[in-house]
Image (cartoon, helix red, strand yellow):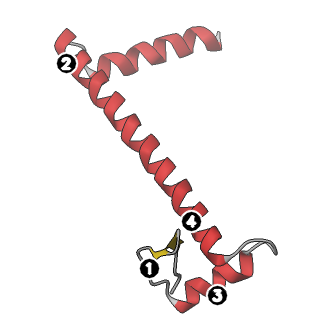
Amino acid sequence: MLNFERRGNPMPQIHIPETLFAEIEKMLPPSASAAEFVVQAVREKLSVEDRKREFYRISDQNRAAMTEKGISAAEILADFESVRGKLDG
């Protein structure tokens, strides 16, 4: 189990299976602790999830705008193919 502390106050604790913890320890740079490694990994994962959420939000906005204008997905794909054909020559 990794323990994280915030200014002397215990923070939430997480349980990491021994096999995963062993993998983490094998991969650690000499100057890093397992807790630092896990914190960084979680931050990276949160960043990925944030970008996914933004992608889906923008996709939903685009879908709504296409629907409002009466444009179908097939029409968009045909337009892309048309432009791709012009670029390919």
Residue at left offset 45%, top offset 84%: 15
Q: Which residue is mark 2?
A: 67
Amino acid, disc 1: Ile
Q: Is 59 left or right of 20, judged from the image as shown?
A: left
Give residue 7's position: percent from left, percent from top.
53, 68
Q: Is residue 18 above or below residue 41?
A: below
Q: Secondary structure at mark 1?
A: loop
Camera-side residue of 26 and 1: 1
The span from disc 1 to disc 3 (Cα, nearest Å) is 15 Å
Q: Which residue is mark 1?
A: 14
Amino acid, disc 4: Val
The furthest residue to the bottom? 18
Residue at left offset 65%, top offset 9%: 89
Q: Is residue 51 above or below residue 29?
A: above
Q: Is residue 57 above or below residue 19?
A: above
Q: Which residue is mark 3?
A: 22
Give residue 13's position: percent from left, percent from top.
43, 79
Camera-nearest label, 3 or 2:
3
Ranked by sequence position, the earlier of labels 1 and 3 is 1
